[in-house]
Image (spheres, grey):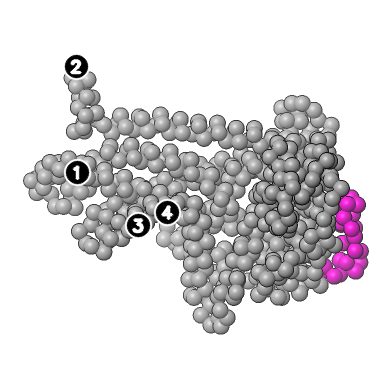
Amino acid sequence: MKKLILATVALVLGAGLAMADTVRMGTEGAYPPWNFVNDSGEIDGFERELGDELCARANLTCEWVTNDWDSIIPNLVSGNYDTIIAGMSVTDERDEVIDFTEQYTLPDPSSYLAMSDDLDVSSAVIAAQTGTIQASYIASSGATLVEFATPDETIAAVKNGEADAVLADNSYLVPIAAEDGDLMMLDADVLIGGGVGIGVRESDTELKEKLNAAILSMKADGSLNKLIEKWFEGSMATF
Amino acid sequence: MFFNCSDPQMLAGLEWLACYLTTGKHLAFYGSFGTVLLLLAITAPISLIFGFGGAVAARSHFPPLRWFGKTYTSVVRGIPDIVFFLFFVIALDQAFEWLRHKVKCPDWDQPIRQGNDFVVCAQAKLPLSSAPQWLHEGYGFSLAVLTFAIVYGAFAANVLYGAMHAVPRPQIETAEAYGMTRRQAFWRVLVPQMWLFALPGLSNLWMLLIKATPLLFLLGVEDIVYWARELGGMKTRAFTFPHADWRLWYFLGLLVFYLALTKISEIVLARLTTRLTHGQATLGGAAMQKAAAR
C-alpha cells in the first residue's frame, strides 16, 4: 500500500518532465457550426477541423477541452488550457486581458432573429449571450437586454416569448432560421467587432507565433477558405 | 433491438428514438449519473470524518484546537455554498500549483502573477498540460469532492457536536465511576450512543448533499445537469439527430432521478433509526422495550 501511494505521488509530481508540447485547446462546444459536441460526444465543427489542421502545421500535439463561455477567459488566464478557439471576436476590451492570433475569419455581421418581421429592434426586448459583443452592443443601445449563458438558450427565449428577438453572429443564426419555420431573420444587420482569432495568454508569445505562422500558411494556400465554405455554406465571407 | 443507426435520416419513430438514445453523447449522459453517485459515495464519508474532527476539536480542552474547531464550523456555515465553491476551487488549485512551483522550480526568476496571468513553470502545472484528459477531469472532480467535504463537514461538525452533548450525562458519570479514563469513556460510551442523536441532523445533511450535487455543474464537471442541458437544447442539421428544444423532458428525467434517490435514502435512514434506537435510554428506545415486553 505504501509503495502504491509513493508510486502515485511520484507519478503525479514527476510525470511529464518530458513532452511539454501538448497544447490544450479550449472551446465552448455549444456554438454550431463553429464548435459543438456532436452526437458521438466529440468536439466537432469548423473550429475543430481548423484547430486540428493548425496543430498539424505547427507540429503541436493538441487536446480539446470544453469550457463554459462566461468563464472561458478566466480559465485561459489561470492556465487550465492554452488557447481559446471558440468563435471569439477580437475586441479591444478582450485584447487588454488576453492576446489574439491572426484572425481566421473576416468580421461577421450580427443579425436579429425574431418570430415576426415587424419589430422595432431599438425598443424591443433582445436576447443575447452573456459576455458577447452583441450583449454589450444591446446594453449600450436603447433596447432591453436579457442575457443567457448559452447561445441555445437565447433562441429558446425567443421561441417561448421571453424575448422579442435574439442578436447573434449571422453565421450562427443562418442554419437555425433555415430550419425553423417560426423564426425569421430581420433585415437589420449590424457590424460589431472584428474578425475571429485564437485567444492565448499574453505571456505565451511563443505559442502565438507558431499559430500565427500556421494560420498565414492556411490563408496562403487557400485551405482556410475551403474550410469556411465547407462549414458555413456561403453565409460567411472568405479571404 | 439493435437497429442500423448508420443512416439516421432514414429512421422513423421508435427506431429513431432507440438510435437517438444510444448515441455516444447519451452514453456519456448515463455515465454522468455514476459521477453523481460517486461524488455522494466519496463525499459523505469524508464530510463525516471532517465533521467528527471538527466536533472533537470544538470540544477540546486545548484552547487553540477548540478555537480552530469553532472557527471552522462558524465560518463555513456562515458563507453561502456557491461563494465557497467558486472561491475554493480556484484558490485550492492555485495554492497547489504555487506549492509545487516553489518545490520544483526554485530557480524560476519571473513573477508568478503577470498582470492577469497566473504563471507557474510547466512542471508545476496540476495536472500537467501533457496529461491525458481523464486526469484533468479527475483532478477537477477531486477538487469538487474536497470542497463539498469541507462545506458539509462543517455542518456535520455542528450536528455531531450537538449529538455529543445530548448523550445523558449519567452515562459518562457511570463510565467514570467504573474507572474509565476520559478517552475510554469518549470512545466506549459517548461515541456509540451519540449516533442516534446525530441521525436526524445527519440525514438532513445527506438530503441536502444529494440536492447540492448539481453544483458540480457550476464547477465545470460534466454532470447530469450539464448533459441534460447540452442534450436537450435545440439541435440543427449540423447534428446527426436534429430535434427541437427538449430540455423540459431531460430536466423532468433529472427530477424523477432526484426524487427516487431521496425516497430510497428516506427508507434506508428510517431503518437505520430503528436499528440505532434499540436499547437506548431515549423515548424511542423505551417504547421499543415496552413493545417487546408485551
The residue that disc 1 covers is B189
Which is more N-terminal, label 1 or label 4?
A: 4
Which is more N-terminal, label 1 or label 3?
A: 3
Q: Rounded to the nearest whole Å, what is the CA distance between mark 1 and mark 2?
A: 29 Å
Q: Indicate the position of residue B125 as horizontal and vertical percent values.
A: 57, 68
Read off the chain for label 2.
B
Q: Residues within 10 Å of mark 4 (few under 14, many from 20)?
A: few
- Label 3 element class: helix
- Label 1 element class: helix
The residue that disc 3 covers is B72
Q: Which residues are magenta?
A: A214-239
The residue that disc 4 covers is B79
Q: Rounded to the nearest whole Å, what is the CA distance between mark 4 and mark 2?
A: 51 Å
Q: Rounded to the nearest whole Å, what is the CA distance between mark 4 and mark 1?
A: 34 Å
Q: Residues within 10 Å of mark 1 (few under 14, many from 20)?
A: some
Q: Indicate the position of residue B192 as horizontal and vertical percent values.
A: 24, 41
**Above or below: residue B118 compared with residue B218:** below
Secondary structure mostly seen in the magenta stretch: helix
Q: Nearer the viewer, mark 4 or mark 3?
A: 4
Which is more N-terminal, label 2 or label 1?
A: 1
Read off the chain for label 4.
B
